[in-house]
Image (cartoon, helix red, strand yellow):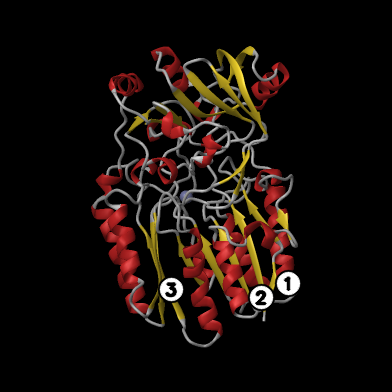
Amino acid sequence: MRVVIAMMKHETNTFSPVPTPLSRFASGQAEPYREGEVVKAFRGTNSALAAFLDLAEEAGAEIVTPIAANARPSGPVEQSAYQAMTDAICEAVAAGCDACLLDLHGAMVTEELEDGEGTLLARLRAINPDLPIACAFDMHTNLYPAIIENCTTLAGFQTYPHIDNYETGLRAGKPLFAMLRGEVRPTVAWGQKPMLPHVMCQGTGRFPNKDLQARTREMEQEPDVLSATLFVGFPHADISQAGLSAVVLTDNNPEKAQRYTDELLEFAWKHRADWVYQIEPLDQSLARAAQVKEGPVVLLDHFDNAASGGTMDTMTVLGGILDAGLEDVAAYAICDPRAVQEMIAAGIGNEVTVSLGGKMSMPSLGLQGQPREVTGRVKLIHNGQYRNQGPAGTGVLFDQGPTVVLDTGKVEIVVTSRQNEPNDQQAFRALGIDPTRKKFLMLKSRVHFRAGFEEMAKEIIECAGTGVCTSDYGQLTFKNVRRPIYPLDDL
Ligand SMILES: [Zn+2]
């Protein structure tokens, strides 16, 4: 048996000005991992791809790994990059194989396509109409019919923060190998609701997603349920099918697949008001922060989340922290490669004044970038690479590019050359900062920070700043999403 295993992941924020060339799909190198590099880079990591490798090895299959490409969320994928990645996968399949297992995101939009994944799957089906295809998806998948029509088995994350990547690979891949052994006949049902759940309300620690995901796991305990998935969708994508959906895979029981799909959808819809987020003004949030006695307190800059396509260089929340005079703060992070180079030139231990952040304009919001002059001492210079040790992406290499810690005396500001979300304490520890000993931690994140920081945080204060991951959907102009849709429209 010959099996093609590949990864092509990107969550596209169509409002983001951050470009997405092929080089963004690599971690620690210029190009995505290719044949010969993939197994070494991902075996043993908390990824669906690692699960696919284990399943294929267990089945005694010959493994072909044409590409593993994973980009941090940003604007639409450059068409040439999409072409290069999908060509690699299609050529490997065209060379002949018995099955294909893909570690995908499910919310990839390119310069020309709303549905990057469905288009790839349709192309694979055209090459080999009978090819068994298993797909693992992120919970933020915006599900399109072409995805369902052109894969054989699938499963999506059941946790947010996403810590079940490997298990999701098993849930997608096991039914495929069982089918190849003639043990099951996968039957799929799916559906969607006209709703855009707010990202700040999507965490699996809170109602209603906590209950929904628990229910999918319960469904999977039944022997004829092969996988059950509730996708919350990714709302910062102005595409027709953005939003919540569900998919259930059974062993030849179409009636149950449909009934369980409907049950998940109805529950999500019934509680749609619980997916709507209330914003607190920034000055109120920072005033509350100033009153807190004991740290660490997370100050969450959720409008500029690097893991949802944020520029990671808006200065509103950090500026508010500096203006409020908060002390003993570590801030992760401002992405500003130019400032990094200036500080590297200044050298460790020296005082610098830099025009920090605000380098990227945000045309979708009608905003120019607004840098802020900051003076401090260059405390540390680092190559920016580290591996996660916490539950999210365990063992995976993260590469924030050349990185500097700028110490103002009150605030230690991490300044990176690439956008990177702090979902693990290593984001600080690799730079010699112990986050547990800080009074305040400013984090540019929305939900994923919880994987690394929720347990240690004495309090979490959500700070409304500026950015293309805005939690105020009223700032976004939706032109392509199907209407009516809740909560943009009264439903
Ligand atoms: Zn996600």
Residue in the foreground of this view, choosing between 381 and 279: 381
Residue lying at 74% horizontally and 62% vertically, measured from the top left: 35
Vertical order, 439 against 203 (above or below): above
- The residue that label 3 is drawn on is 188
CB of mark 2 near ligand 1 (< 8 Å): no
The residue identified by callout 1 is: 94
Residue 33 place in picture, x, y as percent: 71, 55
Residue 77 place in picture, x, y as percent: 63, 46
The answer to whether the residues at label 3 and label 1 have Cβ atoms under 8 Å apart is no
Q: In percent of the image, x 72 and y 60: which residue is there?
A: 87
Q: Which mark is residue 128?
A: 2
Q: Amino acid at mark 2?
A: Asn
Q: Quadrant of the N terminus?
A: bottom right
Callout 3 crowding tier (Cα within 10 Å): few <14, some 14–19, many ≥20? many
Of 166 and 84, nearer the camera is 166
Q: Residue flagged by tag 3: what amino acid is it? A: Val
In the picture provided, is 450 more to the left or to the right than 388? left
**Label 3 within 8 A of ligand 1 by Cβ:** no
> Whole-percent x and y of residue 79?
68, 48
Give the mark nearer the N terminus: 3 vs 2: 2
